[in-house]
């Protein structure tokens, strides 16, 4: 989970070194807290939130595979 | 080089593809993807589709797989003759997809080809295509969106990447055209405008094109962003 979202986000941002992902695992769900450089926030969110939405959808596929819910949070 | 070509017949499609590649027929491998149908008075006709691979490309792929043998070091092959093609010349899009699928724990094979308008179509063969496609193609759409961003990061020439799973795109296209024609009939009969459900730009384009020649009606896209949809309405007289 963590490695996947990290890989995708790194493909989108300019500042790869600033990408940090924290995985908080619950019984039925996983929360992924994603931190990126301030100037990359817009890229990860995308026009009208399209990019972050697409990331969440793809992570949803990964979650279905393991039978859990996954939440991707973009941290300030 | 691999070219996928449509045509009125298999022969015609092959001919166009050969012209594009600029190689004689004996230097290519031809796969027929769809035979195509003649139809009656242009009704029910289907285009033939062929995939034409230059034999050079095939050999390259064979060579690439041989190069994975540990005995062969790259220095040996570069010493004599012209430079060998680098095995890792895969498109950035395919590299991205491979990485994503590895993390997803989904087995998948990717087959990339170039279309007439130079976009790249990547056909994904996987064990779990239903999950990959998602409801109304939602998952596939999201993955395609991200693949386009990843593939166009730090490149000078933008490339459009389309993803397909087991010809899902083609089937969806067919059902969209059927729907569009049905709704167009309805509009003509009732005189009332009908708005379709929100669609992606690609899907809206299919609907617009399907109804371009339909008499008596016009199509129009309305709404913003995710809510953008096609409205089919009567053409005003005069």
Image (tube, coloured by chain):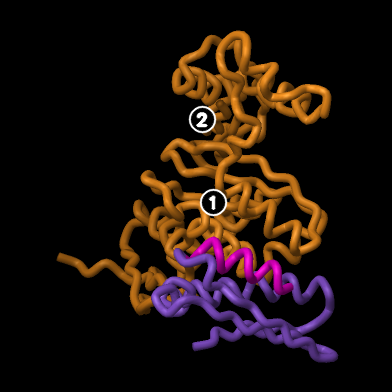
Chain colours: A purple, B orange
- Describe the element under mark 2 as helix, strand or loop: strand
Q: Nearer the viewer, residue B51 or B60?
A: B60
Q: Is residue B135 magenta?
A: no
- Measured along the vertical axis of the image, is residue A12 above or below residue A39? above
Q: Residues within 10 Å of mark 1 (few under 14, many from 20)?
A: many
Residue B211 visible, this orientation: yes
Residue B17: x percent and y percent?
51, 24
Furthest residue to the bottom?
Answer: A27
Instruction: Name the residue at the left extreme.
Output: B238
| Predominant secondary structure, magenta span | helix
Q: For the magenta stretch, what is the residue range?
A: A1-13
Give the residue drawn at x 65%, y 31%. Answer: B87
| Residue occupying image coordinates x 62% and y 22% | B57
Disc 2/disc 1 C-alpha distance (Å): 20 Å
Q: Give the x, y percent position of residue A52.
A: 53, 76
- How many marks the image carries: the answer is 2
Say whether residue B228 is visible.
no
Residue placed under numbered mark 2 in the picture: B7
Q: Earlier in the sequence, mark 2 or mark 1?
A: 2
Picture layout, residue B126 above or below residue B220: above
Q: Looking at the image, is A36 positioned above or below residue B26? A: below
Quadrant for residue B232, please give it. Answer: bottom left
**Residue tagged 1:** B162
Q: Quadrant of residue B194?
A: bottom left
* Residue mark closest to the camera, 2 vs 1: 1
Q: In the shown orientation, is residue B68 left or right of residue B194?
A: right
- The x and y percentages for residue A27 are 85, 91
The residue under the point 56% across, 26% down is: B1
Residues at discs 2 and 1 both on one chain: yes
**Looking at the figure, which quarter contains the C terminus of chain B?**
bottom left
């Amino acid at each position: 989970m963590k490695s996947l979202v990290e890989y995708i986000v790194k493909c989108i941002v300019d500042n790869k070194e600033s990408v940090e992902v924290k995985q908080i695992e619950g019984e039925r769900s996983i929360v992924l807290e994603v931190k990126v450089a301030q100037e990359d926030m817009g890229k990860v969110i995308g026009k009208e939130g399209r990019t972050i939405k697409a990331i969440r959808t793809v992570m949803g596929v990964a979650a279905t595979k393991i039978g859990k819910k996954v939440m991707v949070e973009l941290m300030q | 080089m691999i070219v996928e070509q449509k045509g009125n017949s298999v022969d015609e499609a092959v001919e166009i593809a050969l012209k594009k590649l600029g190689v004689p027929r004996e230097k290519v491998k031809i796969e027929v993807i769809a035979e195509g149908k003649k139809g009656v008075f242009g009704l029910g006709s289907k285009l033939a589709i062929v995939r034409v691979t230059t034999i050079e490309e095939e050999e390259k792929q064979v060579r690439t797989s041989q190069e994975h043998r540990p005995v062969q070091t790259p220095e040996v092959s570069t010493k004599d003759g012209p430079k060998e093609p680098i095995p890792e010349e895969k498109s950035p899009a395919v590299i991205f997809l491979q990485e994503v699928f590895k993390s997803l724990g989904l087995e998948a094979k990717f087959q990339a080809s170039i279309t007439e308008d130079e976009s790249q179509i990547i056909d994904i063969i996987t064990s779990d295509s239903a999950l990959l496609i998602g409801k109304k193609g939602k998952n596939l759409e999201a993955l395609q969106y991200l693949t386009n961003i990843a593939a166009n990061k730090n490149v000078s020439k933008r490339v459009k990447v389309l993803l397909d799973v087991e010809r899902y795109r083609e089937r969806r296209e067919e059902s969209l055209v059927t729907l569009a024609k049905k709704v167009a009939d309805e509009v003509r009969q009732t005189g009332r405008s009908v708005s379709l459900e929100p669609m992606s730009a690609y899907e809206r384009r299919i609907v617009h094109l399907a109804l371009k020649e339909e008499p008596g009606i016009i199509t129009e896209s309305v709404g913003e962003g995710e809510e953008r949809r096609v409205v089919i309405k009567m053409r005003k007289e005069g």
